[in-house]
Image: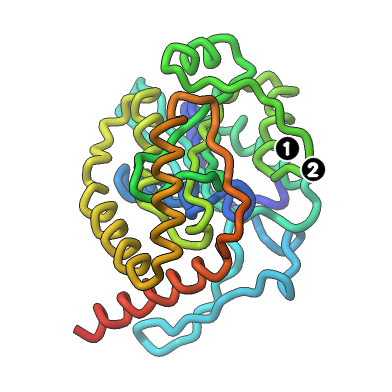
Amino acid sequence: MDYVNFDREPPANLTTMIMAFGGWINAGRAATGAVRYLIRHLAAPRLASIDPEDFFTFTHERPHVRMTTDNMRDIRWPSSEFFMVQPDEGQDGLLLFRGREPHLKWRAYTTAFLDVAERCGVKQIISLGAVLAGLPHTRPPLVTGRSADPDGQAQLEAWGIYRRPRYEGPTGISAVVLDEATRRGLPSLSFSAQAPHYLERTENPAVIQALLSYVERLLNLGLHVSQLDEAIDAFRVQCDRALSQNPSLVAHVRKLEQEYDKTVAQEQLTPRQDDFNSDQFMQELEDFLRQQREEGHES
């Protein structure tokens, strides 16, 4: 495990792992946002990290410099971090992972990743993701699931969210990790939430809550996801204010609402490909939300 730096001796009873990668399949930053919520809510200390040196091109994804409280420069590198939830003696714990999708050496990265999982006693992996879809921010996000494990598939079918994989094309690191996990005999289950396609770069608390709701149903962690309701309400108010400044955007969302209401029982919603300029809307909305944050800091 030359690529892995441990902060402490890893326990061998972290039987369930929840993972999320930034970048690919992280629409609305929902997958990584959900794991961040778990880390904070469960007070999970960091267990280990994967050294980014061999896996990232730093001219493509540059490290960030921040000033500390004592006026020192702190360089933040692209992170791949494991956190642990250690329960009472005799009970099984939880391994959490949140990181950026690496640029290089995916097979070596995957090996290092799963070696950590096996050393910690992981028996099942839960992967979180989010994709862009043609649904409005004014409606509850939809979540689907998949699992190659018969027990996992049966649970997803009982909830009515199981979807048989049909996608063919470019894929992300999470799919590579889960494929290798299957080869190692580790069962896995994936939750994928749908996020509004016109809010691609904006963190969406409603989608985060949707993912966490199914994590709670599966694992009974004692999460109180209703704590996100206030953030969701504020987010929707900000989006509505931004929309109100552009009638064409309002009309587009109204169309999506009508489609959502008519097709919510269908297998999956698909993005609309019309004359709506989603890039323009995303930029306008991000500018508006940034202005709101700056005004909040000033006040």
Q: In screen coordinates, is 216 left or right of 95?
A: left
Q: Residue 212: x percent and y percent? A: 37, 37
The mark that comes first in sequence, 2 or 1, is 2
| Front tag of 2 and 1 | 1
Report the label total.
2
Q: Name the disc covering residue 263, or none.
A: none
Element type at marker 1? helix
Disc 1 marks a residue whose amino acid type is Val
Image-quadrant location for residue 173: top right
Q: Which residue occupies 69% across, 36% down? A: 175
Q: Residue 283: x percent and y percent? A: 51, 72
Q: Residue 189: x percent and y percent? A: 55, 25
User: In the rendered structure, are the residues bearing label 2 and label 1 in contact, judged by CB atoms less than 8 Å apart?
Assistant: yes
Label 1 crowd (10 A; few <14 / some 14-19 / many >=20): few
Q: Which residue is denoted by mark 2 in the rendering?
A: 107
Q: In screen coordinates, is 258 left or right of 191?
A: left
Q: Quadrant of the N terminus?
A: top right
Q: Quadrant of the C terminus?
A: bottom left
Q: In screen coordinates, is 173 left or right of 243?
A: right
Q: Is residue 63 above or below residue 100?
A: below
Q: Which residue occupies 43% across, 37% down? A: 260
Q: Is residue 246 above or below residue 154?
A: below
Q: Name the disc covering residue 176, or none.
A: 1
